[in-house]
Amino acid sequence: MSWLHRFFGSNKTERQASLSPEHSQAIEAWQQLPAEDLNRAHNRCRYVVVDVESSGLDMRKDRLISIGAVALVHGKIDFKDAFQVVLRQDKASSHENILIHGIGGMAQREGMDPAEALIAFLRYIGKSPLVAYHAFFDQALIEKAMHEYLGMELGQTWIDLAWVLPSFFQFQTDARMELDDWLETFGIDSFLRHNAVSDAYATARLLQLAIAAGNQKGSDSPASFLEIEKARRWMHERR
């Protein structure tokens, strides 16, 4: 049983049975795509950098409101290769929450049907490795929504820059740096902070820096970044 089932429970059979034929065909087509070669060099890969906005920070009870994503292809950001969607909400999030991400009540209630939105996301990402900062939160909310609305697990490879970046850049602090700290350090602007696609773009800029540093040190593939993340997590847990 996966962490997803343990965390959220299972309604896979019921949800899959209620999907339209078009949705089922789209999911099957995505599942049949070939897996990405994670040993391929960075400059031959398509990464998808992901950020989400939610109704709060509790992964069990709060809801996925929007997904923003930006692709990094062969080391370059293409502004035409981006994705953003607001999932329709039966009830808008709180006023305090709206002040953070700026997605108003009407925009939430008039968003895209959640199943359609998530299938659009599947089509966009293909089987590309996904990248985020503190990726577990983004991953958990997306997996929760996939489970709820499509009755499936995404099961995609995720790379967490919060673990990868410190292997290449050292700072005079023992604390784990937050995304804003890295952006300030490198002078990267998030033109609309807490907007999912804007934050994904800023994180993609950090990924470019990590790739450049990694190439100099022999960490030249998604697989090498995953090994770095695994090693740093292991060291952190042993402290």
Image: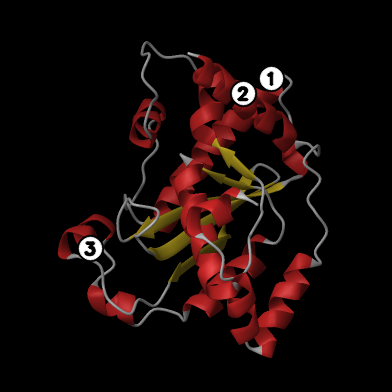
**Rendered position, 61 above or below 114:** above
Tell which circle, 2 or 3, labels the residue nearer the N-terminal end.
Answer: 3
**Rendered position, 3 above or below 17:** above
Residue that extends furthest to the top in the rendered view of this protein: 172
Local SS, label 2: helix
Q: CA distance from mark 3 to mark 1?
A: 42 Å
Q: CA distance from mark 2 to mark 3?
A: 37 Å
Label 1 neighbourhood size at 10 Å, few (<14), some (14-19), many (20+)?
A: few
Local SS, label 1: helix
| Amino acid under disc 3 | Ile
| Amino acid under disc 1 | Gln
Foreground label between 3 and 1: 3
Judging by the rendered image, the residue that carries numbered circle 3 is 98
Is any atom of residue 104 visible in this view?
yes
| Mark 2 vs 1: CB contact within 8 A | yes
Residue occupying the point 50% across, 61% down: 144
- Residue 210 drawn at (x, y percent): 58, 30
Residue that extends furthest to the bottom in the rendered view of this protein: 21
Residue sitting nearer the eye, 200 or 14: 14
Judging by the rendered image, the residue that carries numbered circle 1 is 216
Judging by the rendered image, the residue that carries numbered circle 2 is 213
Residue 234: image quadrant is top right
| Mark 2 vs 3: CB contact within 8 A | no
- Residue 86 drawn at (x, y percent): 41, 71
| Amino acid under disc 2 | Ala
Q: Is residue 204 left or right of residue 34?
A: left
Local SS, label 3: helix
Q: Is residue 106 left or right of residue 185?
A: left
Tell which circle, 3 or 1, labels the residue nearer the N-terminal end.
Answer: 3
Residue that extends furthest to the left in the rendered view of this protein: 95
Residue occupying the point 34% across, 60% down: 62
